[in-house]
Amino acid sequence: MTAGGNATSPAKAANARRTRSLAISAPPRVPRDGRPALACAICIELLPAPKEGDEAAAHAEAVAKVWKEAQEQAEAVASRIALHAPEDVVALALRLAFEGLLAEASSRASLVYVSTATDASFAADLALVASDTELVAWLHEIVDHPQDPPGGSVAAFGWYVERSAWRHVIAQMFTGDPPPAIEATVLRHAGAIGRLATTLEEAVDASSDVASLERRFVAENLAALEDSSAASRVRAFDWLATRGLAPAGFDPLAPSEARRLALEGAEPRRE
């Protein structure tokens, strides 16, 4: 019964029991010029959706309208994001990191980031194993040549850093023996030609990106399987085997005739 004595319908009573209220109080604004602070209170009542009649139709129409607007907004946001492809975002981050490089050991982390984010695998390993002195010498070669910046793509950054790392180490090989950690890194990445500075230099100079340099290394190591030096053949075979490219049935320590036959049998696979 209501206060006036009128009976409340069962449906309205049920709705009243299911009604949920939510009150929100916004913080007051900071008073200015002596005026009192202003606050705002919002009361929201949550009612169950109507089941039948005009109210149910109107409710369904309102819900459909809200969903449609939400979908349009989502598509609009997706369209704006599409203007900046993920590679563009990565390239921008790389450029910012690259521009922040200093010829100091403290830049090691930034150099590791730039190289690992671009698949410049040799540069990444060199940044990890080089001593502080070695790292600073390499960074000077990068930082002191602003007239030769990388392009705007992720691949261009990767090749710039990878080529710089190889050229730094090759220069060391021409003037003396690199430190053991760097020498081991060179052999792991280049295989049999890792001890041949001239061949390495020719491979780097003839390549246009990281992928083309890798293809040159594959070709050089396949050719090294026919080398007269057992050490070179073993090194080339092991390098190819780790990449799943070693000729089937080839034994680098087998007699020359057996090696020749194995290579001839594997020739179609090598092409």
Image (cartoon, rainbow, N blue to C red):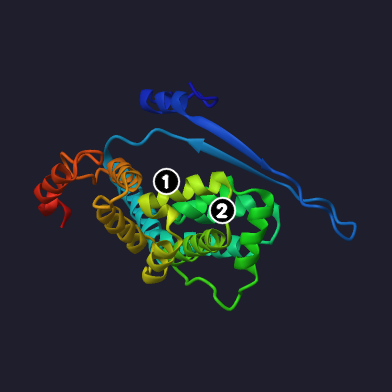
Say which element carries label 2: loop
Q: Is residue 202 visible?
A: yes
Q: Which residue is mark 2?
A: 177
Relative placement, left or right, of 167 versus 267 is: right
Q: Position of residue 73 (x, y in %)?
A: 40, 58
Mark nearest the camera among 2 and 1 is 2
- Helix, strand or loop for disc 1: helix
Mark 1 crowdedness (10 Å alpha carbons): few <14, some 14-19, many ≥20? some
Quarter of the figure that contains the C terminus: bottom left
Residue type of the residue flagged with mark 2: Asp
Indicate the amino acid at tag 1: Arg
Can you tell which quarter of the image residue 234 is in? Answer: top left
Q: CB of mark 2 within 8 Å of CB of mark 1?
A: no
User: Looking at the picture, how far across and down is residue 78, in whole percent?
Assistant: 39, 59
Q: Residue 206, position in %: x, y? A: 37, 71
Q: Position of residue 55 (x, y in %)?
A: 33, 43
Q: Residue furthest right?
A: 34
Q: Residue at x 33, y 63 (%)?
A: 212
Which residue is found at the position 37% from the left and 23% from the top? 10
| Residue bearing the label numbered 1 | 188
